[in-house]
Image: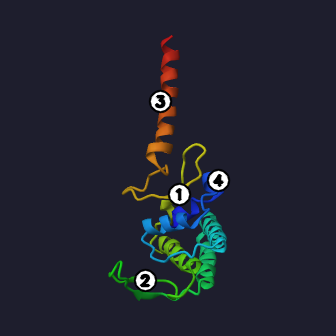
Amino acid sequence: MTVALINTSPARGGEEGLNDTDTLRAMGGEARVYYQPDGSKAEILAMRKLRDRLDDIVKAPDNRQRFTMLNELFYSASAIPQIVTHAEDPRPHFHYTLEDASYVDHLKGVTAYALSRLIIIGEWQRLRTCSGNACNRLFFDTTRNGKRLYCDSRTCGNRIHAARYRIRAAERSLSEN
């Protein structure tokens, strides 16, 4: 959810990707976030502000700055971790805010925890910006060796490989002539 939210930014994808509640619901459904947005324009604007704060955390130059920013995010969400279950998912899991917190505060807690967890378990380096030409999307590298370079191998990765192939083919053609 954190990566998907950050990638809605015009700075990441070229145009605003967070324009309505349906987008929030789709991201939440994919990430199995059971909180429901209220559908207000104010909520969309607050989510954009959260998204930009999260992107600032990702771009921070070191963990000390990230710790400060993440702690501020936890504090602003009145984060109080609890173990809970739901009818939709009876397995025990954490909530990071009180049940009656706003959607935005719930997401502050969840996303701050996700980024904090990456630092704590030593996996922050797997959170990367795509190496594709003209792509600035964020992705989390889930490969075993942690060497993935592109947000999507079918698009960004394929474009790079196709361009390299064309250059090699052109060089071969020139050397044969």
Q: Earlier in the sequence, mark 3 or mark 2?
A: 2
As drawn, the residue found furthest toward the front would be 39
Residue 58, x across and y down, in percent = 59, 65
Q: Amino acid at mark 4?
A: Glu
Q: Amino acid at mark 1?
A: Arg
At a point 52% along the width and 33% down the height, the residue shown is: 163
* Mark 3 and mark 2: Cα distance apart in space: 48 Å
Residue 50 versus residue 163: which sits nearer the camera? 50
Residue located beneath label 2 in the image: 94
Q: Quadrant of residue 59?
A: bottom right
Task: Say which mark, if any, is on residue 165.
Answer: 3
Residue located beneath label 1 in the image: 128
Q: Nearer the viewer, mark 1 or mark 4?
A: 4
Is 134 rendered above or below residue 45? above
Residue 152 left/right relative to 76: left
Residue 2, x across and y down, in percent = 52, 67
For label 2, count other residues whose C-alpha is less than 10 Å away and answer few (under 14), some (14-19) or many (20+). few
* Mark 4 and mark 3: Cα distance apart in space: 30 Å
As drawn, the residue found furthest toward the top would be 177
Task: Say which mark, if any, is on residue 15.
Answer: 4
Q: Nearer the viewer, mark 4 or mark 3?
A: 4
Q: Amino acid at mark 2?
A: Phe
Q: Amino acid at mark 3?
A: Tyr
Q: Secondary structure at mark 1?
A: strand
Q: Earlier in the sequence, mark 4 or mark 3?
A: 4
Residue 32, x across and y down, in percent = 42, 71
* Mark 1 and mark 4: Cα distance apart in space: 20 Å
At a point 44% along the width and 68% down the height, the residue shown is: 29
Q: Nearer the viewer, mark 3 or mark 2?
A: 2
At a point 53% along the width and 73% down the height, the residue shown is: 111
* Mark 1 and mark 3: Cα distance apart in space: 25 Å
Q: Are marks 4 and 3 in contact (CB under 8 Å)?
A: no
